Image (cartoon, rainbow, N blue to C red):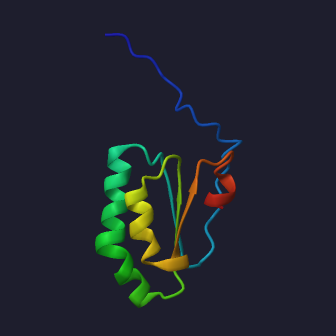
Amino acid sequence: AETRVIPTGVDLDHFRYTPAEANDRVVFCGAMDWAANQDGIGWLLDEVWAKVLAKRPSATLTVVGRNVPESLQAKARAFGASVRFTGWVEDIRPHLQ
């Protein structure tokens, strides 16, 4: 069998690794019109986020991704400013840094 190498498709110069600073920020990047991402963020909001805030009241969650369903936006509103959806962004790098 023939073996071929396929590049990952990520420009590592453009998306240069920057070590995280210690803070209370959680960032998720992913298209929110994909059922698995909706499921994951829904679970996070339903089962986990209140527990995070109980231990770290200054924690924030930023969800970076297009087409956030209203059902998730409604769940997030219960947490006030600690949860934010950006919707589609031109460049995710500032959110990840």
- Residue 53 vertical placement versus 31 (above, below): below
**How many dots with numbers?**
0
Which percent across, then down, holds residue 21?
63, 73
Residue farthest top in this picture: 1
Q: Nearer the viewer, residue 23 or 47?
A: 47
Q: Residue at x 47, y 45 (%)?
A: 31
Image-quadrant location for residue 24: bottom right
- Residue 38 vertical placement versus 26 (above, below): above
- Location of the N terminus by quadrant is top left
Q: Residue at x 52, y 32 (%)?
A: 8
Q: Nearer the viewer, residue 18 or 53?
A: 53
Which percent across, then down, holds residue 28?
49, 58
Q: Nearer the viewer, residue 91 or 20?
A: 91
- Location of the C terminus by quadrant is bottom right
- Judge left or right: residue 92 versus residue 49: right
Which percent across, then down, holds residue 56?
47, 87
Q: Residue at x 64, y 51 (%)?
A: 92
Image-quadrant location for residue 40: bottom left
Which percent across, then down, holds residue 83?
50, 71
- Judge left or right: residue 30 versus residue 14: left
Q: Residue at x 37, y 59 (%)?
A: 71
